[in-house]
Amino acid sequence: MSRRRRGRPLWRTGLDALVVVGLTVLVLGVMEFLPGNNVAGNMRVIDGDSLRPGDNGHDIRLEGIDAPEIGQRCRDKAGRDYDCGRKARTHLKSIIAGRDVSCRTMDVDRYQRSVSVCHAGGTELNRQMVADGWAVAYRLPVYVRSERNAKTARKGMWQGEFDEPENWRRLNRSDSAGSPGEPD
């Protein structure tokens, strides 16, 4: 005599579906940070080396460069102080010029920002900021030549005097603002 097997309870089927949906959302969220992932669209410029996607996604840090902090003071060629951090932010905005930005994630930093190489049109933002003298090459040799050329031509911050952004943070930030030498 064969016994008829009862079907799975409805609540159990619903719970299984909920678990699958939850895992899918989790995996897709983590994938945003995997190296090689691309993010594209409208970006808000936070400072000279940081962007925020228009969809309020996770912040993006431009890989291999370090721009002055907002509020960081530099001296121009006449010896006058100016806020070079704001100038760097303004310059990055001008490079983007309202165009969509595409970024390729290379890493994730300790603040959970995507560390990326980004482009607006055919312009690589990371390299252009260094080439125009509004950021320095940071711990990667890939932008050193651009930095050297900007320094020789006295472009951007190189027209006068400035503290390297890493050194400025070390002297002007407390531990509560994060690691003093690491880019914000």
Image (cartoon, rainbow, N blue to C red):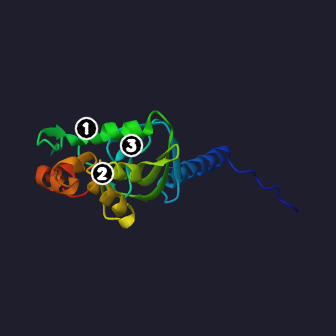
Residue at the extreme bottom of the image, as rendered: 141
Q: CA distance from mark 1 to mark 3?
A: 14 Å
> Mark 3 — residue?
51
Which label belongs to residue 86? Answer: 1
Image quadrant in which you'd find residue 106? bottom left
Under circle 3, the secondary element is strand
Count all numbered tags in the image, as a single digit.
Answer: 3
Q: Is residue 38 left or right of residue 85?
A: right
Q: Amino acid at mark 3?
A: Leu
Report if residue 101 is visible in the image: yes
**Pointer 2: residues within 10 angstroms few (<14), some, or many (20+)?**
many
**Pointer 1: residues within 10 angstroms few (<14), some, or many (20+)?**
many
Q: Amino acid at mark 2?
A: Ala
Tell me which residue sits at (17%, 48%) in the image.
160
Under circle 1, the secondary element is helix
Q: Nearer the viewer, residue 172 or 73?
A: 73
**Pointer 3: residues within 10 angstroms few (<14), some, or many (20+)?**
many
Position in image of residue 80 (x %, y %): 12, 39
Which label belongs to residue 167? Answer: none
For marks 2 and 3 on the same chain, the one whose residue lies earlier in the sequence: 3
Disc 1 versus disc 3: nearer the observer = 1
> Mark 2 — residue?
135
